[in-house]
Amino acid sequence: MGLLVDGIWTDQWYDTEATGGRFERQDSRFRDWVRADGETPYAPEAGRYHLYVSLACPWAHRTLIFRALKGLKDAITVSVVEPLMLENGWELAPGADPVNNARFLHEVYTAVEPDMTGRVTVPVLWDRNTATIVSNESADIIRMFNAEFAPLSSGPDFYPPDLRAEIDAINARVYDTVNNGVYKAGFATTQQAYEDAFDALFNSLEWLDDLLSMRRYVAGDRITEADWRLFTTLVRFDPVYHGHFKCNAKRIVDFRHLGGYVRELYQVPGVAETVDFRHIKTHYYGSHRTINPTGIIPKGPVLDLMAPHLRA
């Protein structure tokens, strides 16, 4: 995250003064869609779209997983920002952005809206043909990759019609209390705000662990969008959120079912290569100077995500 105010970048992660110490996430700014039916100006064409991501960000990570598992790596190009996000916001190494030649992600946003004020976030789906941002909402981008790019893609349908109601219900709770819940705990600036987020988070983790005692995956017997949206938070939990965000009632490996579940999803072909713990830990511990002023990055924990998951 970070903020553009009157075109000037400021190193502002969050503002809790007006919210009683509670972290509130800003809505995504760009919400257009690639459509295979021609209802928008954005058609699913190979080589037309470019994705800006951070390997640290769980929201951007979703899009990388869908790009890999739907066979879209050749169709959609990617730029990866640098791990640290400090006074200049998300940075791009020289040559990392072949589309806009940007050195900072806020330049991609202001190329579309020169007077933009608001947060600069990843992921960003850019359209080369119209030189604009199609979307910076990860939930929309993964559904585009899943369905709208079908003429170019392969792999399973992660949002099947018969499970959509179940997926949507799980997503709603997981988003509020787990995906965003770790941030609510980590960025809280009052004890009450922190404890409320902490309690909601671990209530939901216990609920998910119980669910996985009865189901192979959270929505049933197939891996769905709900699993991948949950996975990108869970895989970061033990190395980052448990300590850095003070979410320390349990580690994921301490749950009876969640630990094996994370290992199983990590071992799906194509997923492990989207996970970079060096990048993840460098970003969180090095960038959040209000939480970790020294910027020291912990060496641990030791994780063996290739160990047998025992979920058969």
Image (cartoon, rainbow, N blue to C red):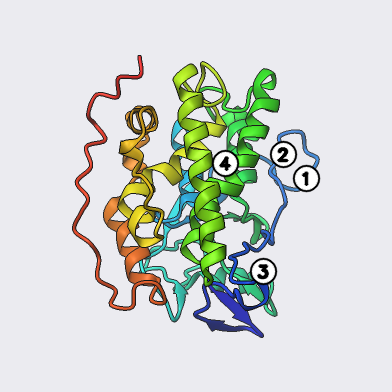
Task: Determine the secondary structure under disc 3.
Answer: helix
Would you name the residue on which mark 3 appears?
Answer: 112
Tell me the residue at 32%/29% (across/down): 267
Mark positioned earlier in the residue sequence (1 or 2): 2
Q: Residue furthest right?
A: 39
Q: Which mark is residue 35?
A: 2
Please, what is the three-letter code of the amino acid marked with disc 3?
Val
Mark positioned earlier in the residue sequence (4 or 1): 1
Near mark 1 (Cα within 10 A), the count class, few <14, some 14-19 or many ≥20, is: few
Give the quadrant of the C terminus: top left
Task: Determine the secondary structure under disc 1.
Answer: loop
Near mark 3 (Cα within 10 A), the count class, few <14, some 14-19 or many ≥20, is: few
Cα gap from disc 4 to disc 3, whole angstroms: 32 Å
Near mark 4 (Cα within 10 A), the count class, few <14, some 14-19 or many ≥20, is: many
Mark positioned earlier in the residue sequence (4 or 3): 3
Image position of 203 (left or right of 92)? right
Cα gap from disc 2 to disc 4, whole angstroms: 27 Å
